[in-house]
Structures are given as structure tokens and as C-alpha cells.
Image (spheres, rainbow, N blue to C red):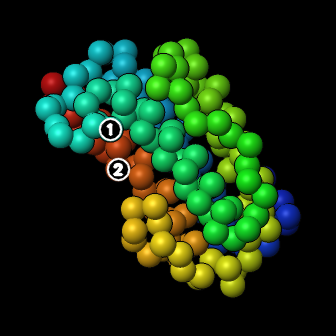
Amino acid sequence: MNVNYSSQYKSGAVRALVALHEREMRKFMAVWQRAAEIDLTLPPTEDPSCKTIDTMLHHVLRASRGYVLWICDNLNLDKPDIISPSKTMDFKTEALSYLESLLDVWSTALIYVTDDQCYIEFKSRWNTIYCIDGMLEHAVMHPSRHSFQLVRIMSDL
């Protein structure tokens, strides 16, 4: 794991959720790679982020970037320097390096968040109210849910 477990973190809860987010992102990437190796076709859906395994990967990477940017923006922390994943990215060759750069941002961007700040509420981009702790939990579960989805589809083959 890349997560900095040092005492630099002001909040143990934030440190734990950042570590869990990294674990779930790495797990998702491993599951996604298995799906790519077998050229998995996803079932038909109206959800544009789940039309193909490539759009799902883009969605998960983009969302992870969005969560950390949202937290930093709402807490007036320095904006991390991480570009959005390109829709034209060659996912099979570039996704792992993008993930590493994304996780590097996650490992440092939130070290100054305090326990008190974890419970301040803000409106998300999709108009749901989240406290920082809740958004961090959402960021952990998002790749986990998509990993579960891919595993379930592959088990039906």
C-alpha cells in the first residue's frame, strides 16, 4: 500500500478510510484486469458508466479523483494536482500508472483533515448531503460495489 501511516495524519479515521480506499481501488483494478483478459461483455444497461468494462474503469477512476477533489474543495485544502482520466486512455496499458498517481494524491491530500472536520456536511455534486466521513466511506464502497458487480457477472459465465 502507498498510504502514509505516519502520525502526519490528524485523524485516525481519515487515515483508515484512505487506506481502505486504496485497498478497494487495487482490488477493483485486479478484478477489472481479469474481466479484460476474458474480454467480458457487460449486460445491457442504460447506465453510460457501465456499458463496457472500459467505461466502468473510467468511471471508477474518475469518481475516485472526484471524491478527493470534493473533500479538498469543501475543506479549503490545497487542490491536488491530478488530471482527469482520459476517455481515450489505453486502459490496458495506462490505467495502472494513472491509478498509482491517483493513490499518491489520496495518500497525502487529506493528512491535515481533523476528526472535527469529518462531520461537517456539504452537498455533493449529485445533490446528496454528505459529511466528510460519509464521503470517504462512499469512496471506499464505490470500487467495492463495481468489483462485486464484475465478479458476479464473471461467475455467471
Q: What residue lies at 38% left-to-right and 25% top-to-bottom?
A: 54
Please report whichever mark, 2 or 1, sits nearer to the chain's N-terminal start.
Answer: 1
- The number of discs equals 2
Decide: is 155 above or below 63: above
Residue kind at label 1, given as amino acid type: Ser
Please give the residue where the numbered disc 1 appears in the rendered image: 49
Q: Label 2's element?
A: helix
Compared across the picture, whether 25 is left or right of 127 comes to right
Q: Label 1's element?
A: helix
Q: What residue lies at 16% left-to-right and 37% top-to-bottom?
A: 45
Residue 31 can be seen, yes or no: no
Residue 49 can be seen, yes or no: yes
Q: What residue lies at 72% left-to-right and 61% top-to-bottom?
A: 110
Q: Residues within 10 Å of mark 2 (few under 14, many from 20)?
A: few
Compared across the picture, whether 33 is left or right of 12 comes to left
> Quadrant of the rendered structure where residue 9 is?
bottom right
Task: Give the position of the C terminus as an image quadrant.
Answer: top left
> Quadrant of the rendered structure where residue 55 is?
top left
Residue kind at label 2, given as amino acid type: Arg
Q: Which mark is residue 15?
A: none
Label 2 – label 1 distance at C-alpha: 13 Å
Task: Give the position of the N terminus as an image quadrant.
Answer: top right
Q: Residue 12 placed where, x, y %?
A: 71, 71
Q: Residue 38 placed where, x, y %?
A: 30, 15
Q: Nearer the viewer, mark 2 or mark 1?
A: 1
* Foreground of the two, 78 or 33: 78
Q: Residues within 10 Å of mark 1 (few under 14, many from 20)?
A: some
Please give the residue where the numbered disc 2 appears in the rendered image: 145
Compared across the picture, whether 17 is left or right of 1 comes to left
